[in-house]
Image (tube, coloured by chain):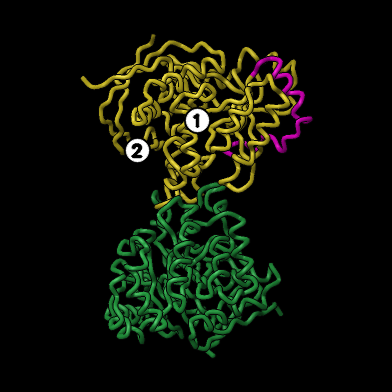
Chain colours: A yellow, B green
């Protein structure tokens, strides 16, 4: 009998489900294998109101249909959110996501400058109300330096709001990994693709648009640092796929959009990676245990049965090309048990 | 009357003219505005024999037709070239180009390892016969580090063969610029695009396949270092476009090939760049004077009259998309005078 691996209540702590037609096309891919996900609020019109959160959650529920899956909603950070507003929102959201202005897809309404005084009111209220702050931490500097340049901002915020849980989203650098150790209230999500690729895979040979993402994949020494904390399920890191679908045409034309679609193959590839490094027993904490503790959530009960058996990844899912399209990977999802 | 600028006998000291259909499509673009070019030997079957050099030169002459243009031929370096062979070639070639194996388009037959003893026979013969050595200096390391990692190899060769003129081709890093100063016999070519772009332009916003090249564009501090020596026409640097055409389809699909096609706009954009930095009076040395001295060549007489007048770059030239396609640039070629 092929080797099996059981993952209990896997969580994707950073996911783009998009909206409209794309939501319909891809939501089930996440809802099938994960029991829940932190859903990013950077829609074309960012999610900044209670009504928008509730309505978006409804659309997601509709799109996933019967699947047992909890969309953990987030709000798009604005520095004028006050305590009363956030209190009224608290029951509907799991976190607030802060984007520096213009740094990635639909982030133009984000924050410009990180003056503590400007952010004080909102961040203090979040800290008091125990609402975690998720940050896309990049400056608008040189593409390979953006995240490392942002680390001092993470640190300034962590110091100014010591009770606020700050999640450094989709970290890609050694600098961010090191910052985790310096501040009790800094946490991080790590994607599948940043554990697997470096800039060499994107642009070292031919140019590979389906591996182009933000933050861009970095240096091998950065990938090593990420692998180091992920494979031991360091208590402050969680899996967050940052699975970010774009239509095939938007990826394969000039001016290709950033984002890698990993939802359909994330758990399978994580199993392959963790097995390769002899760390399979840590995978449960990386994809579920740590997130439960950090976010204080009790996820829906779902067991994913992975089996070691070669699987050829589909060319596309409703017109969205996944990572490893047409390639053969080592694990398949054999069964998903609700419970 | 619009501002005019005269360039005498501009030379492109690093050019890919390809072969067959592509040669027919693009050769005239270079032959129109340059009086000559060092022609790279990395055809599908690399140019490694006297017969191949002569035949390729004939095909180039045929493709350029009436244009007054000298193709300075090169041989694809092999470590078993001996003195007798090189003596028989000397009248037909201007330089020998060395590619590390597999580092760029059609370089699979290149050199693996840079053991001085293995290269001794050929390099000593080249030194004795005063045949310059052009090198594509990249290791097969991480894409952003490859050139800097190669600098010690440049230096080892420069030290071992002090009379051999070594041209570091299409340099992209501060590390290479600095090496110029340490060895009398090290020279360099610099492309237009590496004076203009960094990795930010390739992958900092959307992904731009038409700006993808090898060596890949680097950090802003590297570009500054290149600009510094180019704008003052440092006596050891020359313009070499590395203009490298690929069919539109090969640039705009997944797995896009490396190479930027600049031949039709190179002189115009160099004028714009040098003017912007108040260095117009140095442009003649950068695109001609330095090359004549370094290579000891007497180029054909040709005067290119540039005029400051907005010009919209064509979308493609026979299916090859140039840099700045559909954009408006500041200079046009008003006239080319043979003499």
- Left or right: residue A308 compared with residue A225: left
Which residue is label 1 attached to? Answer: A190
Q: Whole-Å distance between the Cαs marked 1 and 2?
A: 21 Å
| Rendered position, B22 above or below B95 | above
Image quadrant of residue B131?
A: bottom left
Provide the secondary structure element on which disc 1 rests.
strand
Tally the marks. Answer: 2
Q: Residues within 10 Å of mark 2 (few under 14, many from 20)?
A: some
Which residue is label 2 attached to? Answer: A325
Q: Position of residue B77 (x, y in %)?
A: 34, 71
Q: Is residue A127 magenta?
A: yes
Examine the rendering and report whether any part of residue A25 can be seen.
no
Q: Chain of mark 1?
A: A
Question: Range of the magenta residues?
Answer: A104-131
Provide the secondary structure element on which disc 2 rests.
loop
| Closest to the observer, A312 or B89 | B89
Which residue is rendered at x = 53% and y = 67% of the image?
B191
Q: Is residue B301 magenta?
A: no
**Mark 1 or mark 2, earlier in chain:** 1
Q: Chain of mark 2?
A: A
Which residue is rendered at x = 61% and y = 62% of the image?
B225
Q: Residue furthest left?
A: A1
| Rendered position, B213 above or below A55 | below
Image quadrant of residue A77?
A: top right
Q: Position of residue A55 (x, y in %)?
A: 58, 19
């Amino acid at each position: 009998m092929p080797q099996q691996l059981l993952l209990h209540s896997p969580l994707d702590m950073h996911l783009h489900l998009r909206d409209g037609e794309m939501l319909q096309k891809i939501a089930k891919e996440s809802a099938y294998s994960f029991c829940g996900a932190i859903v990013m609020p950077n829609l074309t019109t960012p999610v900044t109101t209670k009504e928008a959160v509730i309505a978006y959650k409804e659309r997601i529920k509709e799109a996933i249909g019967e699947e047992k899956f909890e969309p953990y909603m987030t709000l798009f950070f604005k520095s004028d959110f006050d305590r009363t507003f956030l209190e009224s929102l608290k029951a509907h959201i799991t976190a607030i996501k802060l984007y520096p202005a213009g740094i990635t897809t639909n982030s133009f309404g984000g924050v410009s400058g990180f003056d503590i005084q400007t952010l004080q009111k909102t961040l203090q209220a979040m800290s008091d109300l125990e609402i975690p702050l998720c940050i896309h931490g990049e400056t608008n500097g040189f593409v390979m330096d953006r995240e490392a340049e942002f680390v001092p901002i993470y640190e300034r915020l962590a110091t100014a709001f010591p009770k606020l849980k700050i999640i450094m989203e989709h970290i890609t650098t050694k600098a961010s990994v090191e910052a985790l150790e310096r501040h009790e209230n800094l946490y991080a999500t790590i994607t599948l693709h940043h554990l697997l690729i470096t800039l060499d895979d994107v642009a070292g040979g031919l140019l590979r648009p389906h591996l182009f993402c933000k933050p861009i994949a970095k240096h091998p020494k950065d990938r090593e640092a990420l692998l180091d904390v992920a494979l031991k399920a360091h208590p402050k890191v969680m899996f967050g796929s940052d699975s970010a679908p774009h239509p095939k045409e938007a990826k394969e034309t000039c001016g290709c959009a950033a984002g890698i679609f990993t939802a359909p193959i994330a758990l399978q590839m994580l199993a392959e990676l963790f097995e390769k490094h002899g760390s399979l027993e840590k995978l449960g904490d990386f994809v579920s245990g740590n997130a439960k503790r950090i976010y204080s959530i009790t996820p829906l009960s779902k067991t994913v049965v992975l089996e070691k058996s070669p699987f050829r990844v589909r060319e596309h899912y409703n017109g969205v090309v996944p990572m490893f399209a047409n390639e053969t990977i080592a694990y398949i999802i054999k069964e998903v048990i609700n419970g």
